[in-house]
Image (cartoon, rainbow, N blue to C red):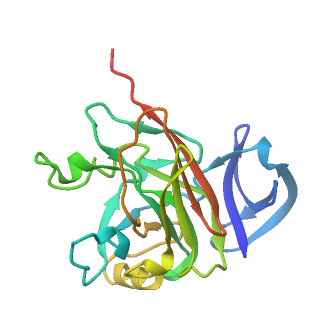
Amino acid sequence: MAKYVRYQKGSAVAYGILDGAAVREIRGDLFGAREETGVTHPLGGVELLYPCEPSKILAVGRNYKSHLGDRQQPERPEMFYKPVSALQHPGGPVVIPQDAANVHFEGEMVIVIGPRGTIFGVTCGNDVSERDWQNGPRKDLQWWRAKGADTFAPLGPAIVTGLDYGDLMLETRMNGEVVQKQSTADLTFDCEAIVSWVSRWVTLVPGDVIYTGTPGSTRAMRPGDVVEVEIEGIGVLRNPVAQRPTPL
């Protein structure tokens, strides 16, 4: 098992291996030939960034049995896109846009694609969603802003390889209160099935990510809240919630 991070120190951005409270710098291609440089940084001395730079973000809807409620189980993975401009770093704020009144958290395990459409590893994600824009009486034709507004895709802190992706405990907390808790064993479509389905029509390249769905129920976030998504073996993705300032 290895934990890979992307970080910034000063003006330099690099990849590294997370080793306890230290980051061991690597050079080369995270998804190909790479090697350690011998440089080590204390974790507190670097700023963690979202751990890869995807060319595209896909996501699965209604993929946990506990999230379906009285809705019928899908016969296939129900996919949608989120723009890469929605990405947010670990620790960065989820910014509630003006006119948004019902913005929810969605703690999720996220697949990170490796070479030739393989699964390189997984990380934590928050598929932030504005429910009125998604499902309300004046909903948009597509979820371009409901799930794609800036900062609506927090990701990180680390990409972890070598785990049993089909049996990891996922827990979401808001202001310290546990609001979601479910094993990834409850997924209707597991990581392999999702990647296989998407790959039939869309070419997945190294660094692409797929949010795999959220368990249980969700609720609205407010400015000042703090949301944490923790997945067994990966770590904690922590993001405060803020309000976008009113334009002058």
Quadrant that contains the C terminus: top left
Residue 31: percent from the left, percent from the top?
Answer: 62, 71
Whether residue 61 is visible, yes or no, is no
Q: Would you say 122 lies left or right of 76 here?
A: right
Q: Would you say 1 lies left or right of 229 here?
A: right
Q: Would you say 40 lies left or right of 168 here?
A: right
Query: Residue extending furthest top?
Result: 248
Q: Which residue is found at the position 39% from the left and 76% from the top?
A: 203
Residue 221: percent from the left, percent from the top?
Answer: 40, 42
Whether residue 173 is visible, yes or no, is yes
Q: Which residue is found at the position 21% from the left and 47% from the top?
A: 133
Residue 6: percent from the left, percent from the top?
Answer: 66, 55
Q: Which residue is found at the position 83% from the left and 49% from the top?
A: 41
Residue 96: percent from the left, percent from the top?
Answer: 37, 36
Query: Residue extending furthest left?
Result: 137
Q: Would you say 194 lies left or right of 5 here?
A: left
Q: Which residue is found at the position 49% from the left and 38% from the top?
A: 225
Quadrant that contains the N terminus: bottom right
